[in-house]
């Protein structure tokens, strides 16, 4: 063949049919029929406009002619071309063309792909059949970025049969209830409870048996019939949910339904949902809209206009397949989704040794970015406990995959062995999940760029660890607690100084809007913890608390260790120390060796704290004298009169065994960056042994 030009489709058919009819049934001559398309072309045309889209398609045609100089080239439409060529190796040719495309359009995320049907004499060489086979082969790799060329094989004949069968029998399948819905559970990462499900279409045909989604969905989309299937799925989902709502009340899973671009182009999909919920009386909060990557290819103003209608009506709107190409950061700039669902292919790369670290960094930074944009995160395709734990530590709010459950009917979800989250708690968990417990760290020099962070949930007297970051886990090991499980066990222990202080710390956090600080020694290390209230679960009344611990940077650790050594020495001498901000009249820090040395008074008004300590710990006959000793209004005058820099006095204080012990209290005023502060200490009143006591006579 030597026709080195681009033919229209009719001319191509005439020339190609003549070539096919001239083939010798016994001859060895072979040809290939190629169907060429560019994945990502529709998005490029939508973003850049029709003129630039046509320019790309035309220049592609020139590129094809240049790379198939002896081939017959025909233009079907837009970016789609047919080539009949000698049966040579086309893979390097397509690779070479993709390199040229990348150089010409470096900003475009497009890729040329080819479906190839080999032609031999003596076979069924009708051009229509050969073209259908090449197209069918191409569809098997159209969304696979790792493959650019695929050859037709006999195993694809079923797909050719379905090309006619599926569109001709869809309406019958809907009417005869051959279309079913299966639900794959979605779990809340921090609780591992089922918090939702994704609706998946299934077709059980009486003639062909199971027709799989990967078979019928592309065909329906090509024929612009996908909206009929999706309308059926919406009706079935709403019917399933309404059938369970009266029996299970709060224990219902919201269901997400996938919508493609054709739902927005070929019908009023918003009205489809509204008709269904009005028909069955279902709350809209139980339905979630998942916008598939293909929907991003239509005009964004049209898409976002419909999505805003869903939002305003009370539906959640999720972005599906984030990271796959269409569903990119540019879309996040234009519309606020409730949740962003990460593409399963990222997890596949996460499992490979070659790309594990790279993908881990990408996932970690993206989840933090999305939370900054006030959106939630879901990841699909989870298969192992290791993946679940890594995703939990890195802040992904929801997870989905065979590891948590296979697709099943809705009743199976509700009656699952896994606990189902009360959907009335959804807002609470969304607010808790939105908190950024970051994990961005650097191994260089052992420097951590994020502090230890965790989220605790307090229900009654029980405390549970919901989330910890890697730095928090490292910190627990550093101070001798162990891992997060050991930390939770310690938090729920019945007694101990640390536990007693934490209990009052929780109470203070739950009463305040801002941060509450707790400082104390544990295992010879100085522990400083800040807590802030996140939210209260309206159903269980559990309180979620963000915990933030200070961590010394590598460059200041040596000074930190010196300070801790000094603090240990002080702790050997004093039972309790309190730092008081006299300017603001509050107790800033409290350090104690044991719970019997008083309650936590950090953040409290100084005068109220003194009265509380006196009432709870000082012998009744000493209480008035104790309050007078610590009266801030008279401290400076008493110091001036005494000519000393500190005040000391002895009081009897509860000893934890039902009695009282003599304790020496000391007041030491100081100046800190222009603020008046003072350090209060408490220690044992050590009486000298008789033979060492000094009498008045011996002093003389």
Image: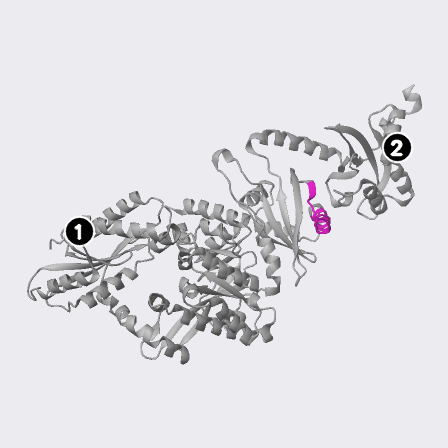
Q: Is residue 472 left or right of residue 159?
A: right
User: Most extreme residue toward the right, as rendered?
Assistant: 697
Corner quadrant of residue 344: bottom left
Residue 299, percent from left and from top: 42, 57
Tell me if residue 124 comes above or below residue 148 in the rendering.
Answer: below
Colouring scheme applied when the structure was drawn: one colour
Magenta span contains residue 512: yes
Magenta span contains residue 536: no
Which of the two residues, 168 or 639, is positioned nearer the viewer here? 168
Whether residue 184 is visible here, answered yes or no, is no
Q: Principal SS element in the magenta part?
A: helix
- Earlier-in-chain disc, 1 versus 2: 1
Provide the residue designation for mark 2.
Answer: 634
Quick one: SS at disc 2? helix
Q: Is residue 640 left or right of residue 87?
A: right
Which of the two residues, 597 or 372, is positioned nearer the viewer here? 372
Q: Quadrant of the C terminus?
A: top right
């Amino acid at each position: 063949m030597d026709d080195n030009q681009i033919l229209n489709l009719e001319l191509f058919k005439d020339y190609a049919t003549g070539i096919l009819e001239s083939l010798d049934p016994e001859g060895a001559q072979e040809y290939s029929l190629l169907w060429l398309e560019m994945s990502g072309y529709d998005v490029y045309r939508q973003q850049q406009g029709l003129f630039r889209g046509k320019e790309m398609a035309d220049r592609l045609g020139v590129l094809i002619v240049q790379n198939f100089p002896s081939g017959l080239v025909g233009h079907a439409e837009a970016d789609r071309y047919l080539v009949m060529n000698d049966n040579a190796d086309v893979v390097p040719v397509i690779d070479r063309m993709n390199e040229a495309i990348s150089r010409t359009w470096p900003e475009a995320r497009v890729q040329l792909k080819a479906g190839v049907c080999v032609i031999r004499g003596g076979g069924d060489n009708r051009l229509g059949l050969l073209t259908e086979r090449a197209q069918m082969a191409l569809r098997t790799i159209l969304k696979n970025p790792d493959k650019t060329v695929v050859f037709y094989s006999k195993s694809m004949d079923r797909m050719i049969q379905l090309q006619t069968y599926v569109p001709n029998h869809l309406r019958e399948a809907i009417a005869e209830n051959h279309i079913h819905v299966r639900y794959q559970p979605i779990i809340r990462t921090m609780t591992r409870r089922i918090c939702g499900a994704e609706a998946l279409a299934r077709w059980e045909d009486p003639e062909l048996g199971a027709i799989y989604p990967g078979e019928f969905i592309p065909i329906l989309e090509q024929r612009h019939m996908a909206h009929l299937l999706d309308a059926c799925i919406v009706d079935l989902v709403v019917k399933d949910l309404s059938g369970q709502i009266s029996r299970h009340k709060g224990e219902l899973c919201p269901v997400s339904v996938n919508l493609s671009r054709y739902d927005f182009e070929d019908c009023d999909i918003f009205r489809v949902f509204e008709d269904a919920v009005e028909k069955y009386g279902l709350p809209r909060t139980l339905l979630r809209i998942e916008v598939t990557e293909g929907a991003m290819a239509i005009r964004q103003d049209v898409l976002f206009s419909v999505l805003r209608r869903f939002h305003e009506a009370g539906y959640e709107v999720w972005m599906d397949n984030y990271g796959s190409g269409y569903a990119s950061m540019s879309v996040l700039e234009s519309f606020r989704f409730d949740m962003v669902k990460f593409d399963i292919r990222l997890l596949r790369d996460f499992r490979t040794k070659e790309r594990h670290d790279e993908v881990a960094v990408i996932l970690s930074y993206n989840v933090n970015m999305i939370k900054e944009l006030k959106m939630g995160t879901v990841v699909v395709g989870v298969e192992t406990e290791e993946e679940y734990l890594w995703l939990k530590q890195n802040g992904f709010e929801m997870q989905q995959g065979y590891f948590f459950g296979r697709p099943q009917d809705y009743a199976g979800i509700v009656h699952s062995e896994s606990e189902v989250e009360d959907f009335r708690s959804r807002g609470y968990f969304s607010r808790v999940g939105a908190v950024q417990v970051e994990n961005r760290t650097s191994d260089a020099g052992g420097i951590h760029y994020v502090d230890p962070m965790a989220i605790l949930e307090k229900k009654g007297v029980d405390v549970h660890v919901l989330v910890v970051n890697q730095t928090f886990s490292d910190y627990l090991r550093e101070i001798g607690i162990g891992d997060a499980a050991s930390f939770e066990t310690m938090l729920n222990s019945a007694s101990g100084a640390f536990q007693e202080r934490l209990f009052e710390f929780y109470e203070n956090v739950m009463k305040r809007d801002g941060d509450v600080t707790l400082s104390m020694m544990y295992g010879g290390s100085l522990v400083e913890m800040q807590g802030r209230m996140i939210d209260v679960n309206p159903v269980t009344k559990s309180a979620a608390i963000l915990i933030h611990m200070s961590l010394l940077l590598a460059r200041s650790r040596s000074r930190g260790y010196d300070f801790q050594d000094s603090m240990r020495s002080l702790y050997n001498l004093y039972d309790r120390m309190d730092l008081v901000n006299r300017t603001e009249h509050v107790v800033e820090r409290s350090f104690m060796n044991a719970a019997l040395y008083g309650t936590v008074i950090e953040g409290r008004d100084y005068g109220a704290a003194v009265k509380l300590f006196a009432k709870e710990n000082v012998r009744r006959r000493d209480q008035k004298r104790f309050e007078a000793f610590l009266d801030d209004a008279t401290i400076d005058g008493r110091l001036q009169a005494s000519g000393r820099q500190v005040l000391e006095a002895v009081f009897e204080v509860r000893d934890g065994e039902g009695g009282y012990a003599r304790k020496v209290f000391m007041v030491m005023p100081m100046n800190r960056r222009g603020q008046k502060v003072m350090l209060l200490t408490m220690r044992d009143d050590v009486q000298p042994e008789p033979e060492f006591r000094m009498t008045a006579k011996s002093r003389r």
